Amino acid sequence: MLKIGLTGGIGTGKTYISRHFIEMGIPVFYADEETKKLYREPEIQLLLRSHFGDAIFTDNQLDFRKMGKLFFSSPEALQQANALIHPLVTERFNCWASKQQNKAVMMESAIIFEAGLASFFDKIFVVDAPLEVRIRRIQTRNPEWSKADILKRINAQMNQEEKCRLAHLVIWNE
């Protein structure tokens, strides 16, 4: 089975492009969705609390806004969280992929390279778009984020030029 990684920075349009692969018969595993599911599991929340304390909780519930602010302002915190979550996401992808009856499967994730998952895939496709288009897309999707918040998130990820250089295929999505 061919394993394809679909990646690109926030706002490049990975999800939009992934729908075209689904239409072509290639099932897509959404790493962000799986990560959100993991963050809601009680044992993961205990693990997060043991690493980050109450800073990312409100009324004993994981607060995704607080978590985002911490992770995108502290590269060390983001790296710790990724080290906890990525092996679990990869494990779930493997389980999911083993149940597919296709010659190819795809994982959509913004941080394939950053998470050290590149060698896990046979091919890596990178979605790219101009910065101003990305910012506009993100503002539409998350109007509560300031431009500074958006740029913080963009800058927390690997540079798009580097991702494109490492890709087997670059998909321009203007």
Image: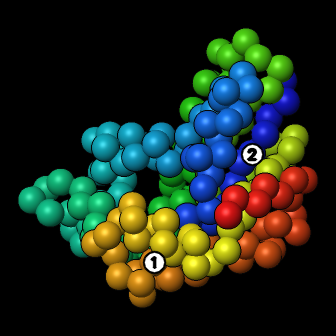
Dot 2 falls on a residue whose secondary structure is strand
Q: Quick check: 5 left or right of 32?
A: right
Image quarter where the N terminus lies is top right
Q: Is residue 15 visible?
A: yes
Residue at the bottom extreme? 148
Q: As drawn, is 150 to the left or to the right of 20?
A: left
CA gap between label 1 and label 2 equals 24 Å
Amino acid under label 2? Gly
Q: Residue at x 54, y 60 (%)?
A: 82
Q: Residue furthest top?
A: 101
Does residue 131 lie above or below 83 as drawn?
Answer: below
Vertical side of 97 occupied by 50: above or below: below
Quarter of the view holding residue 70: bottom left
Check the image and name the residue furthest to the left: 59
Question: Which is nearer the N-term, disc 1 or disc 2?
Answer: 2
**For residue 26, side relative to residue 55 (left or right):** right
Question: x, y percentage for residue 109?
Answer: 62, 51
Q: Position of residue 174 (x, y in %)?
A: 67, 64
Type of the residue with mark 1? Ile
Q: Name which residue lies at 78% across and 55% down.
A: 171
Counting other residues with Cα less than 10 Å from the Cα at mark 2, is it few (<14), some (14-19), or many (20 or more)? many
Mark drawn on residue 150: 1
Q: Residue at x 63, y 33 (%)?
A: 28
Q: Is residue 111 visible?
A: no
Q: Position of residue 167 (x, y in %)?
A: 86, 58
Numbered circle sitting on residue 119: none
Residue 60 as seen in the image, left or right of residue 114: left
Q: Which residue is mark 2?
A: 5
User: Callout 1: helix, strand or loop?
Assistant: helix
User: Horizontal and vertical percent for residue 53?
Assistant: 27, 68
